[in-house]
Image (tube, rainbow, N blue to C red):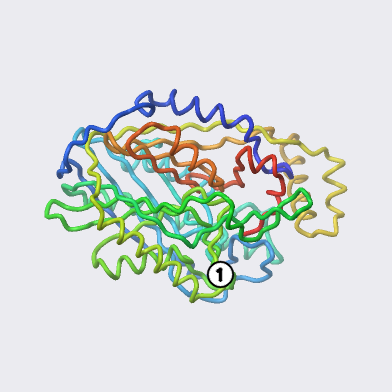
């Protein structure tokens, strides 16, 4: 992949807007029916621990120099399957991982359709983006000081993870029972924009209380025919970077899910990260703060559940498209060879990897297949799930421009390849060096 991995957002804005209309006309200017909630749906959920059982390197911080040294909080994958009255099924998978690699999405989507009859456009995979999870890269060119051990551990873990996700979908399907779907929303305040002007025309990675944020906490409550909660799906737009140590953990999102499940025995609690590419938790850097933020977010979910929830009724409709996003600048072989001599070891290593790809393929890609997905749950909820580390501007803009009763926007879905800046951030620059 070229050094400038920040995709040309200038091309993406009109393409994305057009894709919403083209993928399904009902997604624009749709109106809710207001039909009261009833058990016209079926739903089932399942959960599995995915904490690595062998030594693995951790993802999220390039400066790490050694593998994980233990477990602070177990990691989980969770699946929710929803079926409408017509028998159409939709599956959501959430993961306590830094991202969903494209190859994992493609494999799971193909097998989910073969094994469970769930089409690829009706499967959503979302990562919490915890920086305290395992590294999933299985390309040998990304190997560390011990290439064979690193690659083998990552490949073994990834294969096991894929099988686990498929098993969870099947398990959730076996648990399908009459259910109601209701939506609520609250707010939580520990997220803050992390791009502060440095006075020199650039931006530094510092808390910016004046920067744009999305403090909303959307909540989907799934309950059985008796009214007992089965699943809470909740979202928040904030990096999972409270922690920076060498132990596996779901960070604040992991604690929020744990607290909700402790308060509601039998409930499967699922976190969906939003558009948090430029959002950090503050304050941070201690386990106590991760727990405090998790408690704050769990409390916001509980607050949403006390409101007058909006019932969802209707059919499941979904669309998925991969938009070719152009890279800004393709480096030449000479530029890459010069970069391999850089004093910055990360830049040098990246140039070496790109040269390897250039040698193997003979050319470098000029664009990237960026995933855009829209799900309509009933006549009320339009759920936009985007790949990559999307900045908050997209959630704010889409929720304003899509004229539907409820709009939910999630990033880190189906592929996490790079930051996805808005036009505002693109013009500001300095995104390349933005470190969580």
Q: Position of residue 405 (x, y in %)?
A: 32, 36
In screen coordinates, is 276 left or right of 91?
Answer: right
Residue located 75% across and 57% down the image: 346
Q: Quadrant of residue 253?
A: bottom left
Image quarter where the N terminus lies is top right
Q: Position of residue 181 (x, y in %)?
A: 24, 46
Q: How many marks?
A: 1
Q: Position of residue 179 (x, y in %)?
A: 18, 48
Residue located 65% across and 35% down the image: 8
How would you rate the neighbour count of disc 1 (Cα within 10 Å): few for under 14, some for 14-19, many for 20 or more? some
- Seen in the picture, residue 347 relative to 36 is either above or below; the reply is below
Residue projecting furthest to the front: 210
In screen coordinates, is 331 left or right of 421?
Answer: right
Who is closer to the viewer here, 288 or 358? 288
Image quarter where the C terminus lies is bottom right
Q: Quadrant of residue 390?
A: top right
Q: Which residue is mark 1?
A: 284
- Can see residue 127? yes
Q: Position of residue 122 (x, y in %)?
A: 36, 38
Who is closer to the viewer here, 22 or 106? 22
Q: Secondary structure at mark 1?
A: loop
In screen coordinates, is 224 left or right of 292?
Answer: left
Residue located 17% across and 58% down the image: 228
Residue located 49% across and 36% down the image: 372
- Can see residue 156? no
Residue projecting furthest to the left: 226
- Seen in the picture, residue 66 relative to 304 is either above or below; the reply is below
């Amino acid at each position: 992949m070229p050094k400038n991995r920040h995709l040309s957002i200038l091309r993406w804005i009109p393409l994305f807007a057009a894709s919403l209309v083209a993928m399904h006309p009902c997604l624009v200017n749709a109106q809710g029916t207001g039909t009261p909630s009833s058990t016209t749906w079926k739903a089932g959920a399942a959960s599995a621990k995915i904490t690595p059982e062998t030594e693995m390197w951790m993802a999220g911080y390039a400066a790490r120099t050694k593998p994980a040294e233990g477990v602070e909080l177990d990691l989980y994958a969770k699946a929710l399957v929803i079926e409408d009255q017509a028998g159409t099924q939709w599956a959501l998978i959430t993961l306590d991982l830094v991202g969903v690699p494209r190859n994992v999405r493609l494999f799971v989507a193909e097998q989910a359709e073969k094994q469970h009859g769930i089409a690829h456009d009706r499967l959503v995979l979302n990562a919490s983006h915890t920086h305290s999870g395992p590294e999933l890269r299985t390309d040998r060119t990304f190997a560390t000081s011990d290439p064979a051990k690193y690659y083998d551990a990552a490949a073994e873990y990834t294969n096991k993870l894929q099988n686990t996700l498929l098993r969870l979908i099947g398990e959730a399907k076996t648990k399908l029972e009459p259910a109601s779907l209701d939506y609520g929303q609250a707010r939580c305040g520990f997220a803050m924009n992390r791009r502060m002007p440095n006075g020199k025309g650039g931006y530094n990675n510092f808390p910016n209380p004046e920067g744009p944020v999305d403090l909303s906490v959307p909540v989907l409550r799934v309950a059985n025919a008796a009214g007992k909660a089965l699943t809470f799906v909740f979202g928040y737009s904030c990096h999972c970077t409270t922690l920076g140590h060498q132990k596996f953990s779901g960070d604040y999102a992991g604690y929020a899910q744990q607290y909700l499940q402790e308060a509601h025995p039998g409930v499967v609690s699922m976190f969906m990260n939003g558009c948090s590419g430029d959002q950090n938790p503050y304050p941070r850097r201690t386990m106590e703060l991760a727990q405090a933020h998790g408690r704050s977010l769990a409390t916001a979910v509980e607050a949403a559940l006390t409101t007058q929830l909006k019932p969802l009724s209707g059919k499941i409709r979904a669309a998925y498209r991969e938009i070719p996003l152009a890279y800004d600048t393709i480096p030449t072989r000479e530029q890459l060879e010069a970069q391999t001599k850089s004093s910055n070891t990360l830049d040098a290593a990246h140039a070496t990897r790109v040269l390897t790809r250039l040698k193997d393929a003979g050319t470098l890609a000029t664009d990237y297949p960026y995933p855009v997905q829209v799900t309509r749950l009933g006549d009320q909820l339009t759920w936009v799930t985007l790949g990559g580390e999307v900045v908050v501007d997209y959630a704010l803009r889409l929720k304003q421009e899509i004229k539907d009763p409820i709009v939910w926007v999630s990033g880190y879905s189906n592929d996490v390849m790079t930051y996805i800046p808005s036009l505002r951030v693109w013009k500001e620059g300095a995104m390349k060096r933005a470190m969580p």
